[in-house]
Structure formats: C-alpha cells, structure tokens
Amino acid sequence: MSGHEEQEAQPRAFAAGTITKLVAQKKNPDRVSVFLDGAFAFGVHQDLVLEYGLHAGLHLDVKEQERLVAADRMLGAKARALHYLAYRPRTEHEVRQKLLRSDYAEDVVESVIARLHELRYLDDATYAHDYVRSRFASRGYGPRRLQTELRRRGVRPALIEAALDEFIGADDALDAARTHAAKRWPRLAKEEDPFKRRKKLTDFLLRRGFGYDTVRRVVEELEEGK
C-alpha cells in the first residue's frame, strides 16, 4: 500500500489548500487521492471527483473538504449496504448493525437507511411476510419459532403478527404440528416409559415453535391412536 493510501484511513485536520494532483489509487482504482499544496490530503471515490468538478488548481476551503469527505463516507456506506443486500434480503436492523460494525457514524447510517427505504431496498413488512411464508412452507416451523427468529432480526412485533396472521391460521399450525409429530412419534417407540416418550415429543414440537395448547392436543391424539 502506498503512503497516501495508508494516510487515507487516518484522521486528519483539514486546512484550506489548492489541488496540485489527483492520483488513482493502485490498490483501489475506483478511489482517487487528492493532494493539496503538494501533500496528500484525503481520498474520495472517482464519482465524486466528477460530481464536484475536482481538478488541479482548484482551491478547497475547509468546509468544502469536509463536505467532500462526508459525501465519500456516505457513498461508501451505501455501497457497503447494497453489497450486503445483494446476497439475500435483510431487515433494517441487520443493515444498520452491519454498517455500525463497519465503523460508520450513526448519522451516516441513518441517512443510508432512509435512502434504502426510498429505493425500496428495505421493507421489513415484506421481509416478514416472505420469511413466514417460506419457512412455514419449507420447514413447517410453528408461529412461536418464526416470531422468535424475526424478532432476533429486529422486525417490529406488529409486522411479525401481521405476517403470521396472514399465512398461518390455527388450523394450519395444527396440521403442521400433526405432520411433525407423525414423523417423530415412531422414532420414539423404543422409549418404554410413556411419560418420557410424551415429554420428548412435547419438547420436540415446542422447539419447532408450536404453542403449548397445540402441542398438547397433538400429543394426546397420538397417544389415543387417532
């Protein structure tokens, strides 16, 4: 890494000066090192060079430099967020935490979050609906487990409840619990103690996210041979 690229990561005090050189960075050609009065001052994305009309001979006061660096920070945070979102949908909470862990300031993070909402790259209601629909259909998880997983991802309770109400009715949850129990019950046949067999199935269904009333009903049905 060259000297001026190393300096870019270091905090610096701004001082008015005239651009004497703009140099594409070897390690990251999308970034440009800005030299003021012959010394490295800061680095910015090449898009900002065009947007702000940076060129040799241009005088930059302190406020102009602060605006440039702030705009560069915002651009970097947005790019990091979009890269994070490219792999799979994320919640607002997940994106916020990712940016904060990447050492972006809170005001920058909140601005990026707001922009992502405007672009519809973030939508926790849609995320919750898709999550509940896919997880219930593919894995048969019960409402409580889905609720826990969505809360862990920072989705608001009202959005979680709306998604659960839309896709999982009481009969749906009961049918899913019966399906899991029918597969699990024969595997527990070697357990000679009826109480232990019942408890193991009960614990299994509870871990899958079904409510206690649903679990009790399903277990009782199996025990009665229904």
Image: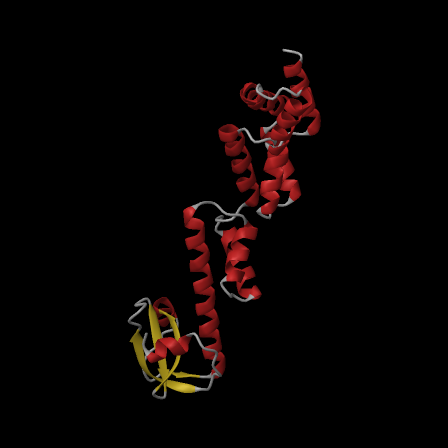
Vertical comparison of 108 with 63: above or below: above
Q: Residue 203's image quarter?
A: top right
Q: Is residue 169 visible?
A: no
Left or right: residue 103 versus residue 18 is right
Find residue 73 and report its horizontal and vertical position in percent: 46, 68
Q: Residue 226's image quarter?
A: top right
* Figure disc tally: 0
Report the front residue among 102 and 14.
102
Left or right: residue 121 versus residue 212 is left
Q: Residue at x 32, y 67 (%)?
A: 28
Q: Which residue appears farthest toward the right when viewing the image?
A: 213
Find residue 47 and report its horizontal and vertical position in percent: 36, 66
Vertical comparison of 88 with 48: above or below: above
Q: Quadrant of the N terminus?
A: bottom left
Q: Residue 195's image quarter?
A: top right
Find residue 29 and report its horizontal and vertical position in percent: 30, 68
Report the front residue among 192 and 81.
192
Report the front residue among 22 and 193.
193
Q: Is residue 78 visible?
A: yes
Q: Which residue appears farthest toward the front when viewing the image?
A: 192
Report the front residue among 195 and 69.
195
* Snapshot colouring: secondary structure
Left or right: residue 12 versus residue 26 is right
Find residue 212 and report its horizontal and vertical position in percent: 69, 28
Vertical comparison of 27 with 224: above or below: below
